[in-house]
Amino acid sequence: MKKPRVIVLGGGFGGLALCKALRRSEIEITLVDRQNHHLFQPLLYQVATAGLSAPEIAQPLRAILGQQENLRVIMDEVVSIDLTAKKVIARAHVLDFDYLVIALGAVTGYFGHHEWAEHAPGLKSLDDATRIRRKLLLAFERAENSSDPAEIARLTTIAVVGGGPTGVEMAGACAELARKVLPGGFRRIDPASARIYLVEAAPGILNTFSTDLAHYARERLEKMGVTVVSGVPVKEVGPGRLVLEDREIAAETILWAAGVEANPVARALGIELARGGRIPVGTDLALAGHPGVFAIGDIASCTDVKGVLVPGVAPAAMQMAKHVATIIKNELKAGTRCPRRAFAYWDKGNMATIGRSAAVAEAGGLEMRGFVAWLAWLFIHLVLLVGLRNRIAVFIQWVYSYITYRRGARIITGVPEDGNAPPGG
C-alpha cells in the first residue's frame, strides 16, 4: 500500500517542527527548501554586526533530519503550486502530495517601494547578514582612508529603519560595535564618534511591548548614543541618504527592519491573499476548499479560536506546526477526514535585547527589564538554537565578547576590486 505523501515547504522553525512531529508516522515526507540549512533568524543581527559567525546560527538540514527515515530533503526552489492537481512545481522537481504544508516564511517588505532594497538591505538570510557586515565594516575602513570630514561623517553614520525588536536589537548592536569594539584599531578616525539613528514611523518604538518597557528601551538606546527618531515616516531612500518627512540623513549604511511580507510563492496559489501577501487559513490552519493544504508561520494569516490574530514569530510557527501534525496523524489513523480541533495560540511573550546587559521582556503579565531580562533572553535563545555544537559555540562567543568587548567575526570578505561594497550591501 502506498504511503501518504506529505510535502513540507520551508526548513524554518515551522517546517522543522512539523517534520520532527511526524517522525514516527507511516508516511513519506519531503522537505523542500532553497537553502540547505535551518537558520536561527533571531540571532541574524549578531552575524550582521560581527558578534557571531554564520555557521554558529545555522545547521544543515540533512544533519538535523538525517536520522529520520521517513523523510527526504530536497534543495530546490518552489516555482508554483497546483492546488487542483495537488502538485508542487520546483525548478528541478515536480512533486505530488496528499498533504501540503507551506512554511516558507516572509521576506523583507518595503511598503511598495522595492527599489529601496538596493540601498537599504533587509535581514532575512545569512547572505543578507554577511552583506550587511561587509558594508558596515567596509564603511569604517573607507573612512580611515578619507581626509574629507563630511565624507568621514557620512561613512560612519548608520541608520536603522524600523523600531520593532529587530530594529532595536540592530541599533543597539551597531552602537556597541562603534563605541566599544572598533575603537583602538583606527588611527585617523574615532569610531566612537559614529552616529547611529533608529527611525520609526509610529509615535514610539517597540509598539508590541508595554509603554514602560518601550520607554526604558528608548532611554537605554539613547544612553548608548543612538538617536531615536519616532513619528517620522521615510519618504525616500537613495545611495547614502535617507529622506524623512522632516529631515535628510546622510548615511553610508542604511538598514531596513521596518516591515515584512509573505514569501512571493503565496501569489502562485491563485487565491485572494490577506494583508502583506499572506495566505488566509481557517482555525484548522488549512486553505478554504483545500483541506489537505496548510499554511503555517509568517506566510499564514490566521485568527485563532480565541479571535487572536496569530503573530509572525517563531513560537507561533512551532505551535502551528504541532497542531497540523496532530491533524494529519489523527486523519491517517482514522482513515478519513475526522473533526479538526481549532488552533489556539499560546502567547509566550515578547523579548528584545538592547545591548550588553540590557533587555526587555514580558510574558503572562510579568515584565522584566535590564540585566535579569538580558539573562532570560540569553537562556531562551541558547535553548532554542538547534545543535549542541552551536549552543556551545554561541555561549563561548558571548562570554568572550562580554569580558573583552571584542568580536571575533570582523573579517571582511567579498570585497570588490574598487574597495566598495557591492549594491545592496
Image: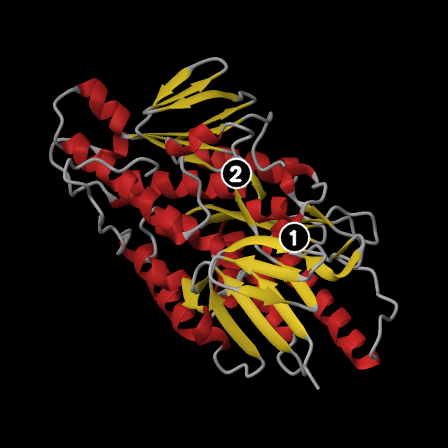
For disc 2, the marked residue is: 217
For disc 1, the marked residue is: 349
Image quadrant where one finds the N terminus: bottom right
Image quadrant where one finds the C terminus: top left
The amino acid sitting under disc 1 is Gly
SS class, disc 2: helix
Image x and y of residue 295, in percent:
68, 56
Image x and y of residue 182, in percent:
23, 42
Q: Is residue 174 rendered to the left or right of residue 295? A: left
Quadrant of the rendered image containing residue 205: top right
Pick the residue in front: 356 or 241. 241
Q: Is residue 79 rendered to the left or right of residue 142? A: right
Give the residue at the far bottom of this rendering: 1
Q: Residues within 10 Å of mark 2 (few under 14, many from 20)?
A: many
The amino acid sitting under disc 2 is Ala
410 is higher (above) or lower (below) than 210: below
